[in-house]
Amino acid sequence: MIKILGEIDKLQKEINSFRPLSKNILKQLKEYYRVGLTYSSNALEGNSLTETETRIVLEDGITIGGKPIKDLYEALGHSEAYDHIYKLAKNTNILEVDIKKLHKLFYHRINENKAGKYRTEKVFIAGSKYTLPDPDKIPVLMKEFADKLKKLEQKYHPIEYAALVHKEFVFIHPFIDGNGRVARLLTNLVLLQKNYVIAIIPPVLRKDYIESLEKAHTSDGDFIEFIARTVRETQKDYLRLLR
């Protein structure tokens, strides 16, 4: 773990050497990762849009024939939530209201009544041996989660902090749907707040992602290392673009 964090710090130092970047370059990078993160985060949850189709939906506003309307709504909603994490990144903290807003932006086209609101039903994660909290416990758990973020931030390396925010949130699973998407947006919000680049989890790594997250119920190590590897690979891609 110490080795990979050292590699990340070294890559970050090189990224910082290119800064400040021009407004035009920053805009292009933001759009580049908008498509990549929206496609990958949705694909991890079974969305059928390819990366090219996601780009067409987001950049050209064209619907894709034969695709479920929910898949299109997920792409558009994720794009809106993606824009919002850049606004939130200007802050030094993450509030409970910020988390609700991210879900509302992502989910409002799919179900306006449940967007940004905690679930009132019991839910299960297929393939997991761990149960999720009952809905009546969620308001208290989410308040506790938001209150402990500053302590996590002060105690851990930024990459570890980003991974733990993801884990702690998704184990509460406060919304009826879209929890994985919001968890990955929160991870990236932390990274942006700490001046790192967007981290993308490729759909091909879905099995490793789920397995490491399942292990995190008893030990955080594998999941933190998994997130660290995705940060490192995205840093390398970022540097490739800058060079």
Image (cartoon, rainbow, N blue to C red):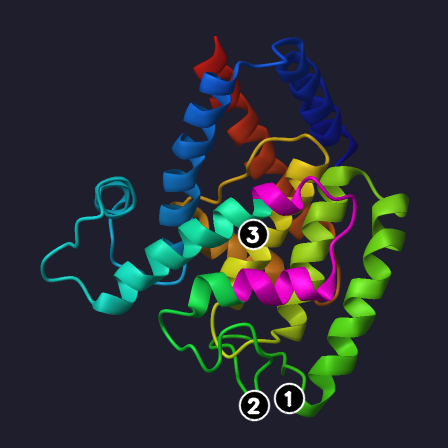
Per the image, is 100 magenta?
yes
Query: Residue drawn at (60%, 74%), measured in percent from left and top?
Result: 173
Q: Of the residues shown, which amino acid type is indicated by label 1?
A: Pro
Residue identified by numbered label 3? 185
Q: CA distance from mark 3 to mark 2?
A: 23 Å
At mark 1, the secondary structure is helix
The residue at the point 85 percent across, 61 percent down is 148
Residue 239 screen position, x and y as percent: 52, 16
Which of pointers 1 and 2 lies earlier in the amino acid sequence?
2
Identify residue for label 1: 135
Residue name at image x 70 percent, y 82 percent: 138
- Give how far apart the Cα atoms at labels 1 and 2 are: 6 Å
Question: Which residue type carries mark 3?
Answer: Leu
Res 222 label = none
| Location of mark 2 (residue) | 122
Q: Is residue 23 magenta?
A: no
Nearer to me, 91 or 9 = 91
Mark in front: 3 vs 2 = 3
Q: Quadrant of residue 58?
A: top left
Answer few, some or many: residues within 10 Å of disc 3's Cα (few below 14, many 20 plus, some between 14 and 19).
Answer: many
